[in-house]
């Protein structure tokens, strides 16, 4: 080997390096979006066709709004779910995200215009329905759409990711888009906003429309991110000023959607934790035989929450009340005002309905338990009667049948008895028969009588006593 030649290394790469290479290859193979990816032009045309709201799309939207409004009105989850499957609202929302992702200003403006048309007709249809509907009570399905939280943004964002990924495939995944439509729930908030207009409730309108805005912005944002991730070719903006304006608008919409919903979600978490702490406090501290808790109310406020308890029985003394309040910080109720209603209720604002409801529930529970005990007793007695009837011997019939076989029988009786042996504590059943005849009988005749009795009474052991 000459001095200028370098030694050839036959050593293999380190084991940890080959492991990471294989691991990265595995992740790329499993999570790659390149397989079955459709052509950009085909995806753009497919989403672009769903943007327009005219003809069948508009009619389908109106019918879906009416179905969802009826579902909210009668608290029918099935009707609301069906309406979300019919609704074509995803089209323009996806179009906005796609247009922003490829810098297609015309698509953005067309999608915004059609989304505004869809919202307008949705509000008109739902408002007209709730104006003529005889049912004006806000059901739980409707009230759920008036308090948006940060979880709604997460659902809309991840649902939008699933929707745009499925839409970018050559072979469309049939169950993804309907699932996204149900999860993101674009229809019910618009119907709830129509209910708020019909009933003149601006708070409901603000909450419902804000929920629709959250869902729309997050779906568009997820579509924008996936389009950029897939590397779709971008069009140049007409000018840098327009590009800055579009980006600024996007960020403003995202902030409007996320920041208030995050705050509302934080308050809901605080309220839920507060209610759980109150329940634990009540269950552990108010378990007394001398007084009974009729009911309690947990009112959450940002500054000072209130726990209101209604007691009957022996009143709480001031020292006991002070000791009770001192235990509240250990339950996470540091800044909570404890209000106890007890003793003389003449001057107290007692919730009579709550007391009546609690007492009624206790009476019903006691009655149900009492009925269950009586039913158990009746069933037990019925089984005993059936067993007694099965074990009862037809002595008169046996006597008459034996008289037919042996006319000289004079006295006859039979009964079942328990037979105890000296070596066992478990009793055995024995058929004991006594018979007196007018003449003596042979051992063969006695054996014949025993066999007949064993067959006739289905008894394994028979003891015949003959005189």
Image (cartoon, rainbow, N blue to C red):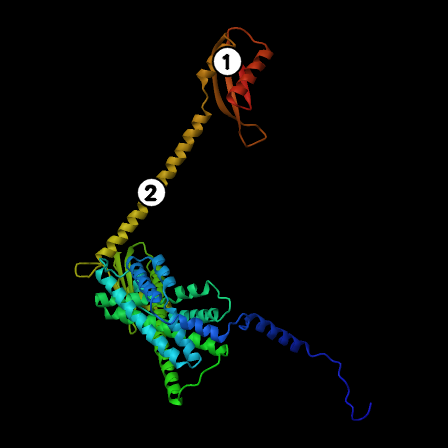
Q: Which residue is mark 2?
A: 370
Question: Residue 338 has which mark?
Answer: none
Say if 243 sits above or below 466 in the image.
below
Circle 1 SS class: strand
> Where in the figure is residue 211, as x and y percent of width and height?
33, 70
The image quarter in which residue 97 lies: bottom left
Q: Mark 1 sits on what residue?
A: 435
Q: Residue furthest front?
A: 55
Residue occupying the point 39% across, 76% down: 96
Of all residues shown, which one is farthest toward the top? 439
Residue 10 placement, left or right of 329? right
SS at badge 2: helix
Left/right of residue 28 with respect to residue 60 in the rendered view = right
Q: Earlier in the sequence, mark 1 or mark 2?
A: 2
Q: How much space separates mark 1 and mark 2, taking CA atoms?
A: 50 Å
Can residue 306 be seen in the rendering of this structure?
Answer: no
- In the rendered image, residue 327, in percent from the top left (x then y), is placed at 34, 67
Residue at point 31% right, 44% down?
A: 367
Contact, mark 1 vs mark 2 (Cβ under 8 Å): no
């Amino acid at each position: 080997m000459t001095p200028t030649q370098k030694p050839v290394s036959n050593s293999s790469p380190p084991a940890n390096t080959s492991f990471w290479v294989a691991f990265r290859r595995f992740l790329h193979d499993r999570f790659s979006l390149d397989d079955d990816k459709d052509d950009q032009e085909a995806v753009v045309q497919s989403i672009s066709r769903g943007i327009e709201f005219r003809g069948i799309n508009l009619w389908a939207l109106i019918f879906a709004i009416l179905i969802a409004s009826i579902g909210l009105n009668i608290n029918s989850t099935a009707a609301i779910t069906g309406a979300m499957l019919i609704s074509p609202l995803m089209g323009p929302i996806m179009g906005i995200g796609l247009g922003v992702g490829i810098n297609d200003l015309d698509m953005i403006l067309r999608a915004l215009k059609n989304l505004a048309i869809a919202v307008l007709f949705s509000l008109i249809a739902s408002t007209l329905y709730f104006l003529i509907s005889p049912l004006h009570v806000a059901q739980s399905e409707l009230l759920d759409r008036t308090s948006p939280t940060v979880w709604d943004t997460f659902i809309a964002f991840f649902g939008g990711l699933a929707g745009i990924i499925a839409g970018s495939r050559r072979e469309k995944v049939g169950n993804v888009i309907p699932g996204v439509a149900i999860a993101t729930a674009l229809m019910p908030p618009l119907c709830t906003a129509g209910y708020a207009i019909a009933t003149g409730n601006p708070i409901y309108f603000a909450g419902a429309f804000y929920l629709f805005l959250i869902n729309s912005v997050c779906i568009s944002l997820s579509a924008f991110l996936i389009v950029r991730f897939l590397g779709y070719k971008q069009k140049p903006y007409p000018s840098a000023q327009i590009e800055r304006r579009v980006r600024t608008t996007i960020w403003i919409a995202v902030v409007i959607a996320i920041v208030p919903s995050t705050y509302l979600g934080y308050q809901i978490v605080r309220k839920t934790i507060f209610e759980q702490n109150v329940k634990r406090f009540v269950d552990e501290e108010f378990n007394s035989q001398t007084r009974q808790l009729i009911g309690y109310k947990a009112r959450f406020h940002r500054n000072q929450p209130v726990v209101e308890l209604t007691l009957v029985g022996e009143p709480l003394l001031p020292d006991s009340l002070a000791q009770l309040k001192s235990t509240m910080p250990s339950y996470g109720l540091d800044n909570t005002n404890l209000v106890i209603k007890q003793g003389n209720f003449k001057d107290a604002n007692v919730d009579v309905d709550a007391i009546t409801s609690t007492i009624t529930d206790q009476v019903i529970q006691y009655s149900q338990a009492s009925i269950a005990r009586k039913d158990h007793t009746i069933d037990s007695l019925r089984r005993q009667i059936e067993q007694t009837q099965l074990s009862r011997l037809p002595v008169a019939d046996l006597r008459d049948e034996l008289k037919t076989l042996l006319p000289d029988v004079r006295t006859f009786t039979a009964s079942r008895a328990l037979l105890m042996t000296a070596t066992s504590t478990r009793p055995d059943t024995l058929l004991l028969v006594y018979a007196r005849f007018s003449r003596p009988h042979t051992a063969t005749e006695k054996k014949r009588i025993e066999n007949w009795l064993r067959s006739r009474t289905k008894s394994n052991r028979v003891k015949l006593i003959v005189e």
